[in-house]
Image (cartoon, grey):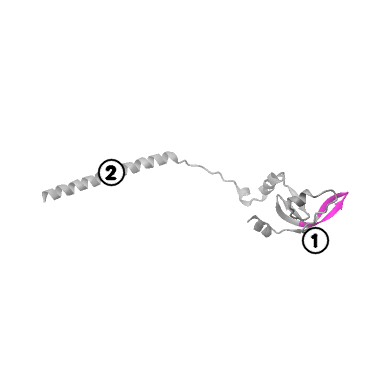
Amino acid sequence: MGQDDEALADEWAAALADTEQDEIKHEKEQQFLSTQTHDYEFTDMGPDAKAGSSSGKRDLDFILDIPLEVSAELGRTKLLINELLQLGQGSVVELNKLAGEPLEIYVNGKLVARGEAVVINEKFGIRLTDIISPIERVKQLG
């Protein structure tokens, strides 16, 4: 039984040595991690930031000067290259919309409204008759 006691003592010593090594390794990891983290202080933006009412105008002013491409579409059609090459002055291209149907107004390629053509001071314009609802515009994005 003396050998069993020695073997058991050796196993305990090895286990204690492993535990000590694990603890040392853990302490080194914690020291390293403590050097990698930083404490930050966040300033309170105040009641104006929470309310959003007074700064809302400034936020909107920030985007008011962004240019957008607005286009109106009378109708569409598809042509073969052969048909396109045969077009000349006086040719008529038939579109997919009927006379009296509303024009479609696009902003940056997204449908936002419909309207009818008008002439003002010898220039074409569009009188809006229908604005696309926000829900429909969101559906177009997907």
Residue appearing at x 67%, y 59% in the figure: 135
Q: Position of residue 137 (x, y in %)?
A: 68, 57
Q: Is residue 98 magenta?
A: no
- On the rendered structure, is 6 left or right of 101? left
How far is the residue under mark 1 from the one under mark 2?
87 Å
- Which residue bears the numbered disc 2? 20
Residue appearing at x 82%, y 48% in the figure: 88
| Relative depth, front residue between 52 and 92 | 92
Q: Which of the two marks, 1 or 2, is nearer to us in this view?
A: 1
Q: What's the mark number on residue 26?
A: none
Q: Which residues are magenta?
A: 114-126
Magenta portion: prevailing SS class: strand
| Relative depth, front residue between 86 and 108 | 86
- Which residue bears the numbered disc 1? 98
- Reading the chain from its start, which is encountered first: label 1 or label 2? 2
- On the rendered structure, is 56 left or right of 123? left
Per the image, label 2 sits on a secondary structure element best described as helix
Q: Residues within 10 Å of mark 1 (few under 14, many from 20)?
A: few
Q: Is residue 122 magenta?
A: yes
Instruction: Identify which amino acid the numbered label 2 is placed on.
Output: Glu
